[in-house]
Image (cartoon, rainbow, N blue to C red):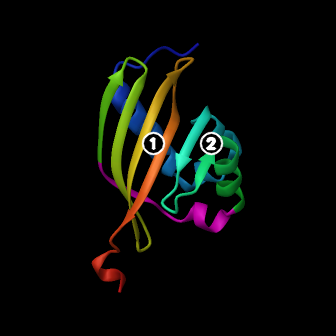
Amino acid sequence: MPTEPADPVGAAMEAELRLLDPAVRISPQQLAELLHPDFCGIGASGRTWNRDTVTAALTTRLESAQRPITASHMRGVQLAPDVVHLTFDTESGAQRTHRSSLWRLTEGRWLLYFHQGTHFGARADAG
């Protein structure tokens, strides 16, 4: 069984960045390694997602899943021994999104338990 990392916030950030990797986003197996069984997400559109629906959407929409995503301004705080909250911004094409994630330490691994994204202003050079 994996042991608890010395830096929970750093471990959650590392896992979050893995989730942004296009190769991970198109792999059901790699997504399963990062998403909590009770995962819940609220998309910028207002749609709610669970582990199965987000995995199906990411692995079947290969073009959007493979689009590069750049993260910035990532910050985190450990809320409890087994919970880390991350906030950050992402950019993919002209789309910019504020993001908030809750990561739970589950059986020695940090898994994404909750995620929400909110679109904000387009890039100045996007037209």
Q: Residue at x 65, y 53 (%)?
A: 26
Q: Residue at x 57, y 17 (%)?
A: 107
Q: Is residue 10 left or right of residue 68?
A: left
32 or 23: nearer the viewer: 32
- Classify mark 2: helix, strand or loop: helix
- Classify mark 1: helix, strand or loop: helix
Q: Which residue is drawn at 32% across and 26% down?
A: 78
Disc ID at residue 32:
none
The percent coordinates of residue 24 (x first, y second) are: 59, 48
The percent coordinates of residue 41 (x first, y second) are: 54, 46
Neighbourhood count class around disc 2 (C-alpha, 10 Å): few under 14, some 14–19, many 20 upward: many
- Which residue matches tag 2? 31
Please determine whether, in this image, residue 103 is positioned above or below residue 98: above
Q: In which quarter of the image is the N terminus?
A: top right
Q: Which residue is drawn at 31% across and 81% down?
A: 125
Disc ID at residue 16:
1
21 or 113: nearer the viewer: 113
Name the kind of residue labelled 2 in the image: Leu
56 or 28: nearer the viewer: 56
4 or 87: nearer the viewer: 87
The percent coordinates of residue 123 (x first, y second) are: 32, 75
Farthest-out residue, front: 46
Span shown in magenta: 61-73
Q: In this view, does 112 lie to the left or right of 33?
A: left
Name the kind of residue labelled 1 in the image: Glu
Q: In the rendered structure, does residue 81 fall within the stretch colored magenta?
A: no
Q: Tell me the quarter of the picture where residue 2 sits.
A: top right
Neighbourhood count class around disc 1 (C-alpha, 10 Å): few under 14, some 14–19, many 20 upward: many
Please determine whether, in this image, residue 59 is positioned above or below residue 122: above
Nearer-N-terminus badge (2/1): 1
Q: Tell me the quarter of the picture where residue 84 sits.
A: top left
Distance (Cα) linking label 2 and label 1: 11 Å
